[in-house]
Image (spheres, rainbow, N blue to C red):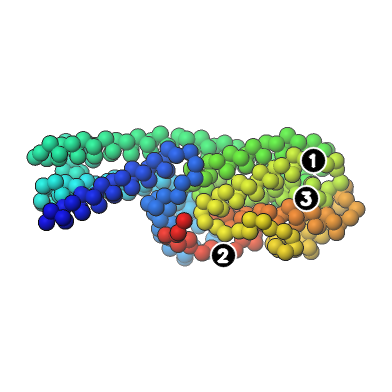
């Protein structure tokens, strides 16, 4: 009997410690931290949302449902953590002399929610009750302080996505971006734009790994998405660098590199596989040579100056695209991104991620 109580106390202590550690990893640690509680919970809820969307035919219906996925998953973390904490302290109360399961439940719930209508019979019970009350308040405070940070990052992200629609249309298109820039004589004046998006990608890399729920927060406009915007900007930079006959723009190359590094870090967090050292043509891309030639013809028809050697231009474009091709399409699938050319229009079929994965 004594041994079973010792084991119960240690299991309860471990459960409470794991729960507090989960909250700290999610809300406090300023880096990507894979948590064994939050990750399976988000994936389980995603499967429930997938079941809800199984019989929906239109993207608009699925988008309305998915708009609630990230907020519901985020808010549900608090009751999940409170439940785990209550169970852990119930085990510790039982191990220290409260033999009735019902009394364990009442004492743990009263302490966790700071209701104060139940009290233990010994000093150790009072000490455990004080600790549980502090943990309960801490979890609530962490969630409350976490939400403004998340929505601030979401707002900064969406400002850039909305601004891109002015330049690249909705859904965003790299070809439309180049055509509009050509019409207003801005093809040689894109340095600030590339620099702005280089910074945007750096912020996305930080915020969408440390605040991973942001990946699934959907844009206010159902036809916009942070991931399709990212793909359009990188494709535009790759086309301008490889195809369009304008003075060399080093900032465009830096923008592409910042972009594919950001997407790779996000893919790492979710365990999405990709080739870390891709090379074209050994590693293929999902843009065909025919699509590339049709794009060049479309640009030439609008008097956009193109480089003479289109064979080399294709190799240069594919050499840029291969760095982000797979992670871009996989993230489009993961986030159920709306239609956009050269990204979500060719994304692979969705497969649920396993609830538990090895590190």
Crowding around mark 2 (Cα neighbors within 10 Å: few <14, some 14 to 19, many 20+) is few
Local SS, label 3:
helix
Instruction: Name the quadrant containing residue 293.
Output: bottom right
* Depth check, front residue: 131 or 226: 131
Q: Is residue 212 left or right of residue 129?
A: right
Residue holding disc 2: 349
> Who's the residue at 39% across and 52% down the image?
36
Q: Nearer the viewer, residue 205 or 194?
A: 205
Instruction: Inspect this view and state whether residue 141 appears.
Output: yes
Image-based side of 87 in relation to 317, left or right? left
Measuring 14% from the left and 40% from the top, which residue is drawn there?
125
Q: Front-most of 186 and 137?
A: 137
Q: Which residue is mark 3?
A: 239
Q: Mark 2 vs mark 3: which is more N-terminal? A: 3
CA gap between label 3 and label 1 equals: 12 Å
Where does residue 28 sit, x and y in percent of width and height? 42, 37
* 207 and 93: which is toward the camera: 93
Q: Which residue is mark 1?
A: 249
The structure residue drawn at horizontal position 18% and vertical position 36%, both measured from the top left corner, is 127
Q: For the residue labelled by badge 2, is the local secondary structure a helix, a strand or a loop?
A: loop
Task: Say how many tags the image has.
Answer: 3
Q: What residue lies at 74% left-to-right and 44% top-to-bottom?
A: 253
């Amino acid at each position: 009997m004594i041994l079973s109580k010792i084991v119960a106390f240690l299991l309860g202590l471990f459960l409470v410690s794991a729960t507090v550690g989960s909250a700290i990893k999610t809300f406090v640690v300023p880096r990507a931290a894979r948590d064994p509680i939050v990750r399976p919970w988000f994936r389980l809820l995603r499967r429930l949302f997938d079941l809800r969307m199984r019989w929906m035919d239109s993207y608009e219906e699925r988008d309305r449902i998915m708009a609630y996925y990230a907020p519901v998953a985020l808010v549900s973390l608090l009751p999940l953590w409170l439940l785990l904490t209550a169970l852990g302290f119930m085990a510790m109360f039982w191990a220290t002399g409260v033999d009735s399961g019902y009394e364990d439940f009442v004492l743990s719930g009263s302490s966790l929610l700071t209701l104060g209508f139940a009290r233990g019979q010994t000093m150790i019970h009072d000490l455990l009750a004080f600790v549980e009350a502090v943990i309960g308040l801490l979890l609530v405070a962490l969630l409350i302080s976490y939400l403004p940070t998340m929505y601030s990052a979401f707002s900064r992200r969406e400002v850039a996505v909305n601004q891109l629609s002015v330049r690249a249309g909705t859904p965003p298109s790299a070809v439309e971006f180049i055509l509009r820039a050509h019409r207003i004589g801005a093809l040689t004046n894109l340095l600030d734009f590339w620099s702005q998006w280089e910074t945007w990608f750096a912020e996305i890399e930080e915020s969408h790994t440390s605040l991973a729920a942001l990946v699934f927060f959907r844009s206010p406009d159902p036809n916009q998405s942070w991931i399709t915007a990212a793909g359009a900007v990188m494709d535009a930079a790759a086309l301008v660098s490889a195809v369009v006959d304008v003075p060399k723009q080093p900032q465009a190359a830096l923008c592409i590199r910042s972009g594919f590094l950001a997407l790779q870090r996000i893919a790492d967090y979710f365990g999405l596989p990709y080739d870390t050292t891709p090379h074209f043509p050994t590693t293929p891309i999902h843009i065909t040579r025919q699509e590339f030639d049709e794009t060049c013809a479309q640009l030439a028809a609008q008097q956009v100056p193109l480089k003479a050697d289109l064979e080399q231009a294709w190799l240069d474009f594919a050499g840029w695209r291969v760095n982000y091709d797979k992670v871009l399409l996989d993230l489009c699938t993961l986030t159920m991104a709306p239609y956009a050319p050269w990204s979500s229009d060719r994304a692979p079929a969705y497969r649920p991620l396993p609830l538990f994965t090895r590190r």
